[in-house]
Image (cartoon, rainbow, N blue to C red):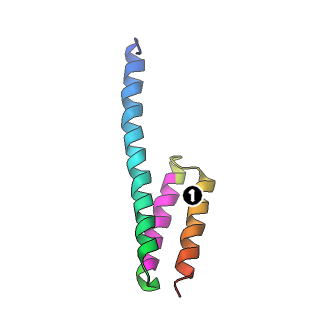
Amino acid sequence: MANHQSAQKRIRINMRRRLHNRYQLKSCRTAIKQLKQTKDQQTATPISQSIYAMLDKLARKRVMHKNQAAHKKAVVAKHVNSLQ
């Protein structure tokens, strides 16, 4: 366990950030699962736009690597395009 006050505070901050980042990643995964259950392109398009925004934000905040976000966006786009 950390002895210095600044180290203890850093541990607390890291735990808060970790929980927040995990929540953001989980909500993005849930949205992708919701998108894959849709069978209509009309309803899938707005969902995919919100997923793109989520992934871009996660990559910008460095919660997720930018290449991983790009890969997930490609998977989403491929699914939406297959719904014709």
Above or below, 76 relative to 16: below
Q: Is residue 6 visible?
A: yes
Count of number-bearing discs: 1
Identify the secondary structure beneath mark 1.
helix
Q: Which residue is mark 1?
A: 69
Q: Kindly identify the residue that appears in the image at 50 percent across and 66 percent down.
A: 52
Three-letter amino acid code of the residue under disc 1: Ala
The image position of residue 70, as x and y in percent, is 60, 61
From the viewer's perspective, is 65 left or right of 42? right
Look at the image and tell me in which quarter the N terminus lies. top left
The image position of residue 80, as x and y in percent, is 52, 78
Q: Is residue 47 visible?
A: no
- 79 inside magenta stretch: no
Q: Kindly identify the residue that appears in the image at 53 percent across and 46 percent down.
A: 62
- How crowded pointer 1 is (Cα within 10 Å; few <14, some 14-19, many 20+) is rated as many
Work out which residue is located at the far top of the displayed protein and give it: 3
> Is 19 in front, or is 82?
82
Above or below, 75 relative to 24: below
The image position of residue 66, as x and y in percent, is 60, 53
Q: Look at the magenta stretch and give its main secondary structure.
A: helix
Above or below, 51 relative to 21: below
Q: Kindly identify the residue that appears in the image at 56 percent across and 62 percent down.
A: 72
Work out which residue is located at the far right of the displayed protein and give it: 67
Give the magenta-colored segment's residue range: 44-58
In terms of image quadrants, where is residue 7? top left
Above or below, 6 relative to 58: above
From the viewer's perspective, is 67 left or right of 12? right
> Is 49 in front, or is 18?
18
